[in-house]
Amino acid sequence: MSGPLVYTDTATLPFEILGHIFSHVVGGYPIYLRALFFVCRSWYNAVRYHSVLWTDIRFDGVVANHFDFSTRFSGSLAENYYRCCLAYSGTAPLDVAVESKFLILFRRKESVLHIRNNITLIIKTFLGESGEHALRWRSFNWMIGHAHKDGVNGCLSIFPQMLPRLQTLRMHSLWGAPSRPRFPHCSQLTTVEFYQTHGDPLQDDDFLRVQKLSLGKNTIWFPKDVVLLSRFRNILHLTLYSLSKNVLFHSNSHPIHSQSVSLVHLRTLVLQGIVPKEPVTALRTPSLQEVCFNHPHSFQHLRCPPFTGTVHSIHVTVPEVDGSTQFSVEMESLLSALPALTSVFIPRWLFLQLETTRFELDARTKGLMVIVEDEINHFCLVHRAQYTAYDQCTPT
């Protein structure tokens, strides 16, 4: 624990235990700690001198409900709150989040305009007068409502040239523009999530540092999304996801078959929602071992040549819906298309369907390990004739 030597009253819990308890109160928002200052001296000390309680620095709808951001930010209660968080956090790494999407729901247009004018000042406060706090940024979540109206270019222009300790970066709705500055250099960047983001948001060498990437879209995927994906050549874990139920790939004038994405180090691929086949089949993944997906649309993707020779494990989390009886047929086809497959994670409802099909016979023949999953987080080992099934259930 950082901070001075602190003694607690005999009638209260020890300093360290109070800090642990209060960490569950915070929930990512140090603003909830304010009332604890006034309980007693022991609680004040525990709140004030546990620096880790103050390391979540957020501007979003939750904090906006506590402060009036529609007036001048400088000298306001909100600015004082943020400066206290930064001071109380000491030298601990900071997890910073700036979200302006909540402004879309604001009814008063004048208030929205004032708040957007304050966003640059808020980020400047998070960075520090001379960039001293930027040296401690460990993660940065930037959820943009409207890139132009939220002054993204102005925000990027005040960033320092480097965020030396940043490891995790999440950007939502940052559209590329020729005159837009790139994000600062991040020498320790390992995890990136881009949603509705394209262009070249990172420095060239930072693309190569990333090991875990999540790339998401709402409704339409474009060839430029595949181009962006190709910049992350050293990733080990890739998640592609869509949030809409109606997803399509808009090829424009760029034929997707001419674009392949070589990810020679990729080990795990996760497909969430409806992901078009174009960005998936463009992948060249000679080291891929594990694939996870939660939508039946992904069955056909995994039968394509880029995956058939290397995948050892698949994790199916498709929910049971009306008309899901055809999934057993899809599983049988998938099993025959993946000769290197050694283990399958499937939900119980699908396993019960497969027991009455050829899948069980094929699984015995291949010595396949089938792990059946329920919502209950227990495993029990069930031995079958010539193959092993791990049944995730309550042991009897």
Image (tube, rainbow, N blue to C red):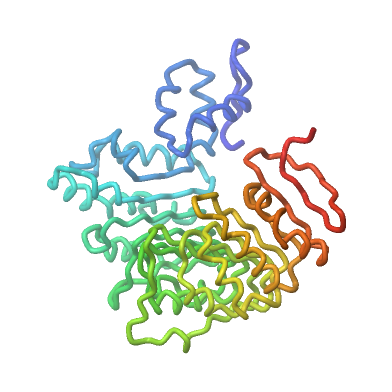
Q: Nearer the viewer, residue 359 or 105?
A: 359
Does residue 93 lie above or below 7 as drawn?
A: below
Does residue 370 lie above or below 102 as drawn?
A: below
Residue in the image at 50% along x and 77% along y: 231
Does residue 383 lie above or below 232 as drawn?
A: above
At which x and y percent is residue 154? 27, 63
Q: Nearer the viewer, residue 135 or 274?
A: 274
At which x and y percent is residue 170? 45, 58
At which x and y percent is residue 98? 36, 51
Quadrant assignment for the N terminus: top right
At which x and y percent is residue 40? 48, 15
Residue in the image at 24% along x and 50% along y: 104
Residue in the image at 57% along x and 60% along y: 326
Does residue 70 lie above or below 246 as drawn?
A: above
Q: Nearer the viewer, residue 283 or 14?
A: 283
User: How many numbered marks appear?
Assistant: 0
Q: Is residue 166 visible?
A: no
Q: Is residue 110 left or right of residue 35?
A: left
Quadrant assignment for the C terminus: top right
Q: Nearer the viewer, residue 132 or 386?
A: 386
| Residue located farthest toward the left when viewing the structure as drawn | 110
Q: Is residue 221 visible?
A: yes
- Residue 377 placement: quadrant: top right
Q: Is residue 186 left or right of residue 149?
A: right
Residue in the image at 25% along x and 48% along y: 103
